[in-house]
Amino acid sequence: MKFLTIWLVTAILIIASPFAHTSAAETFRVMLRVDSFPPYSFEKGDSRSGIIKDLFTALAKETGDTFEYVRVPFRRALYQFETGKIDLEPMCNPIWRQSSSLHGIYSIPFAVSEEIVLFNADKYIPINSPEDLLGKTVGVISGYHYPVYGPYFADGRINPYPLYNENKLIQLLLAGRLDQALMNKDFAQYQIKIQNLKDRLIISEPCSVLDMMIRFHPSKKDAVPRFNKAIEKLLNDGIINQIYDRYR
């Protein structure tokens, strides 16, 4: 009887082990932009999924979790995170949320975000630091945090030209109304690729490189270890690089 009991327990463990991750599986509400921000996300109804959705599809295969995407304006999304109506911010760095009333809990890094200066090709100059742009006007996104250039904007050494999105910055660069603008490198590269702009726009060397992490609402802190384990596996297997390469 003793051996039968041991055999039954062993059999149950063997059968259950492939499904162990599902016992803790949850449904998470994930912040997603209302507008398109390729290659990270695309507007609702677009056949392209984007890096964020592709990443969470890969994570779901490892953790067993499911994800609901919440599309609301950015400031409202941040408020909904603070009030617990959104569980996850998919690509974030603590430096961006220093002023938030709820700092959240962060996963291990899974990628980096590189900030570059995008130039109208006719106005390109090599730059090594903000000092190379003293007295110039630089396009920026209203409300964004610029850790390297922020102090230069604050004291007037460089003049910021705020606009509401990256597409508008590119439009003004192409029209010659701006000479340069600060921008996410992945976004700039994607636009240059799909619009065939390689002869009209030039990307600088990165001026800021920040780790990208998933920001969890504190109520979801118990999920962080399994997400970290899944991220580590996806990195080691090269899956995350493959996801990014689809859009490069």
Image: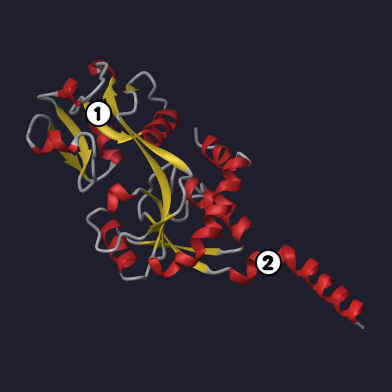
Q: Which mark is residue 173?
A: 1
Question: How many residues crowd mark 2 within 10 Å: few (<14), some (14–19), many (20+)?
Answer: few
The residue indicated by pointer 2 is 20
Q: In the image, is residue 139 above or below residue 54?
A: above
Q: Quadrant of residue 189?
A: top left
Which three-letter amino acid code belongs to the residue tagged 1? Leu
* Gap in angstroms between the C-alphas marked 1 and 2: 53 Å
Which three-letter amino acid code belongs to the residue tagged 2? Ala
Q: How far across and how far down the image is residue 121, in percent? A: 29, 18
Q: In the image, is residue 118 above or below residue 214?
A: above
Q: Which mark is residue 217?
A: none
Question: How many residues crowd mark 1 within 10 Å: few (<14), some (14–19), many (20+)?
Answer: many
Left or right of 183 in this view: 52: right
Q: How far across and how far down the image is residue 244, in percent? A: 51, 38
In the foreground, 244 or 122: 244
Q: Residue at x 18, y 28 (%)?
A: 177
Quadrant location, the N terminus: bottom right
**Residue found at the far left of this picture:** 156
Label 1 SS: helix
